[in-house]
Image (cartoon, rainbow, N blue to C red):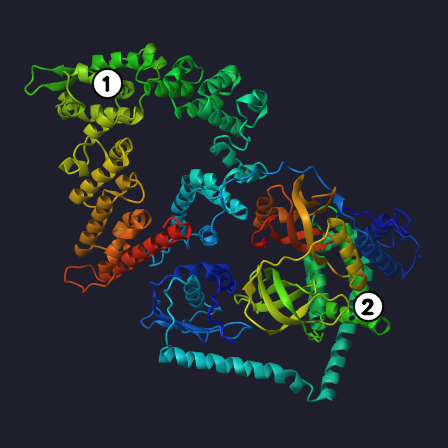
Amino acid sequence: MTQQGVRWTADQVLALAPDAASRNASGELAAAGPWSEVGSSDEGTVWGLCKGSGSQPYQTVVDISDASGPAYKCGCPSLKSPCKHVLGLLLLWADGDGVVPEAKAPDWAERCTAQLRERTREKRTADSSGPAAGIADPEAARRRAEQRAGRITAGATELEQRLTDLLRGGLAGAEQAGYELWEEMAARMVDAQAPGLASRVRELGAIPSSGSGWPVRLLEECALLHLLDQGWLRREHVPDGLAATVRSRVGLSASADGPPVRDRWLVLAQYDTADARLTTRRIWLYGARTERAVLLLSYGAAGRAPEPALPVGLALDAEVSAYPGAGQRRAALGGQFGPPAPTELRPTGMTTAEAAVRYGEALRDDPWLESVPVTLEQVVPVPDGADWQLADAGGDTALPLPPAAGHRPGLWRLVALSGGAPVKVFGECGHRGFTPLTAWPAGPGPAVALC
Amino acid sequence: MTRTPAPADAPVPGVWEELVTSALLGTDRRTPPGCEPGPRAPAALLDAAAAETVRRRAGLCPARAARRPEPAPKDPRPPLPAAAARRLTMLLADRPGPAGGGRRGAAPDLMELLPQWLATANARGFAAPPQTVPALLDAARGRTDLRPAALTFAGPRSLWLARLNPDWRFALRATPGGGTALPGPEATERVRRLWEEGLFAERVALLASLRAGDPVAARDLLASTWTTERAEDRLMFLDSLRTGLEPPDEPFLEQALADRSRNVRATAAELLSALPASALATRMAARAMTCVSLDRALDPPAIAVEAPHECDAGMERDGVVAKPPSGRGERSWWFGQLLEAAPLGTWSARLGGRTPEEIVALPVTDDWRSDLHAAWCRAAVRQRDGAWARALLGAPTAPEAGGPGAVSLAERAKLLGTLGAAERAEWVAGFIATHGLSEAFQLLGMCGVPWAPPLGRAVVDALNIARDAGSYPWSFSGVMGLAERCLDPSEASRLDGLLAIPDETEDASPGAGGYWAEAFQRLVRTLRLRAAMAEEMGAG
């Protein structure tokens, strides 16, 4: 599949950037000055020589012929991927003002392209043969799974003990107990190979002294953690869908084995959250035909952008497959049948009351669910004391925004876009309130990312 | 979200509260409701709490809507073309690189192009995309030089937003009519209410907007509460009269000369002196006249100066500050203030019917020349007197124009401000052709953008000369930066010859040629980018 004639937008390029510093640096390189021998071919490669600090210019090549994502190679020593040279070159090309002419690739670029394509092919083969290789010894795999389940059971049992001790002595003591206690407990859950339990425990540690009402929040989270422990310990006795949810909540990874669903998937939102080790990327897609929102989760080591990068406002013709678990939103991106392209498409929305019901119903399948993806139709951002809410234009009900949202630039973009008039807003709706992620003006106009 | 339990099969009220209490105190001390005391109690409490938590979350209902803000006023301007909107987003997202980066690279500095982009957008009358307004407000907040253009472009929605976010209050202050949806003359009652109850920023804005349309009403409004205002507020209100100052303002200002606050008195005096026909200006003229005379006994005749020997109460009432700053003689201090406030029209008759040029050319006795000329410079700027400014500026090619003289470069820059754009550009072009670039920065800043062709040519020629002289380009980074922003984009092609790295001559600084090539590349690229930006807005 070639991308001839489909130039990317600058947004599409910048969405690839691993961090803000790279984005800024790439802007500086998005001018003809440091570049020579730049060109692009109609097979979907872009190349150029970029003058760096060394004596030899860096050879930079990007292959965008594969719809599932670009492959790139640059001679610079940067550890970031993609580096600023790749981004700068793509920006230069996306600009489309003739700086990057259609040309025949020079030898060095040909060689790089061939290497890139070889690498992609190898990866494909590895991907498709990977699981097969794993099943080569089903007996060993079963033994490994059993061992891990045993460890998780020991971890969950220990955690139950810890929770009952806590409740016996009273939560009031938790404020004095300090964070180390929870950290140690979380480390034990990591040892027990239950990362889902570990992260919940770590979050428990942050609740004491987290502002008024913390005992209520701590009791809620302790109770839900207890529920998850019990779900795991009695997983043989709960319905299959719920058991799958419990397994995934505990942290047992499964592969997306749902049937592939082909649709025009509108990119509703993309945002990254990062800690010291890991960048997590969430992309919400909305199927034009299926009218369903699915979540693509991807991870990147710190400093590396997770893939793929899908800017808000584009739509892609592709297949996605759901992960196992009742009410599961997470899906994996399968085959793509064309590059992402701008779209006028918007998701259909609902009222605030319907959104609250949607969340309540989703809890039936997954009681640990923090929020559900929801598009609100015709809502107005309204200040409510120090906080904000989204109020139905035609009614007197509203969903509050989480207090922290008031300090984000996204909120102000939303308020400015609305100007007191109804807008359409996509976001995550849960027990903490509604977190807006993308909005559309009442009249015609592109989607505005709020995250 | 309000925590309203679902109405269907609602549990006994207070169950959750009791669970929380037991959890806080511990099951050893408080047995949770519906449980047996003993070792099973904590698990039973967790079971009950889990059920309650899920029930509470599942039963959440939306909250009641708070009072909605008034919708933002309509912005009738046409929307920005899509390409220009993308460009704006990039310009606003560009943050200055890491500090202390030293040498400027070869890439354009986007943030520096924002002012021009805004000017073009405003000239074409486009409306800002609403979602960009917060970023525009943030940019305007950080850079006061950007404020007027950014706020104009951001339009009525920016004022609507500023009322919702205290961080952007400055916008209400900075914009005439700040977010008051302009109460017209028919809305007298609204004006009065806002004037009496509004925030200070809103009142200043109201006064400014009213003054633009109906100066009499604005003055009446100000006079109605004048005596009850705080001193610092009086000062700010008075300052707002600076725009559109006119003879009918005199009685009010004259009254303010007796104000309790010294700063208010001084500002009133300053404003009155900018009205050459005012009584204060006449009084100052009379005082100044006694200090300056023509000594015809000398050949050629010269100006004789007799500075005042005291600062009397009348002078102080007219705004003369009695105490000089340290290091300044009292008499020269008083003399400067008198001359500065006296109408320039006085001098021709006093000094033998001479023109300003002839007066400036006269010798001055006893080293008073620099005091006298500096005071006249301030007067020419204050009274916006082009003829006197021209005379004091002198010929740009004169040797003393480039060096320290009676009139400093800063004063020359201010004097230039009173001349028309074409004359200004021509003067600065002449100055650069004679004196080079090292002193030109301040003067260039006074010239209209894009630079007129002769000025642009003079700057490029001078840069070329500086390069050939073997210096480094960063000695000229200020002018280079200005050139990037101010040179007419159509000049880009004329710079092509400067982009190559020249062969290094013996006396050149090592590597300078390469850095110059880089600096010129950056200049050309910035010019091309500016041309592209203009094209995106259909301003070709």
In the image, taking residue A145 as reference, residue A316 lies left or right, namely left
Residue A420 numbered mark, or none: none
Whether residue B67 is visible, yes or no, is yes
Q: Chain of mark 2?
A: A
Q: Which quadrant of the structure image shows residue A110? A: bottom left
- Three-letter code, disc 1: Gly
Left or right side of B497 for A334: right
Check chain identity for marks 2 and 1: say if they share one. Answer: no
Secondary structure found at label 1:
loop
Q: Is residue A173 visible?
A: no
Q: Is residue A365 left or right of residue A116?
A: right
Residue B272 vs A20, above or below: the answer is above
Q: Position of residue A226 (x, y in %)?
A: 80, 63
The residue tagged with tag 2: helix, strand or loop?
helix
Q: Are marks 2 and 1 in contact (CB under 8 Å)?
A: no
Residue at image mark 2 = A231
Residue B43, percent from left and from top: 86, 61
Q: Amino acid at mark 2?
A: Gly
**Residue sitting nearer the eye, B322 or B447:** B447
Q: Give the number of the mark in front: 2 or 1.
A: 1
Quarter where residue B319 is shown: top left
Vertical order, A78 against B221 (above or below): below
| Dot 1 alpha-carbon crowd within 10 angstroms: few under 14, some 14 to 19, many 20 or more | few
Q: x%, y% of residue B107?
A: 36, 58
Which chain letter matches label 1? B
Q: Which residue is mark 1?
A: B345
- The local crowd at label 2, few if under 14, some if 14 to 19, many if 20 or more residues have their Cα within 10 Å, is many
Residue that appears at 62% across and 62% down: A266
- Vertical arrangement, residue B500 with respect to residue A56, above or below: above
* CA separation in Å, label 2 and label 1: 95 Å
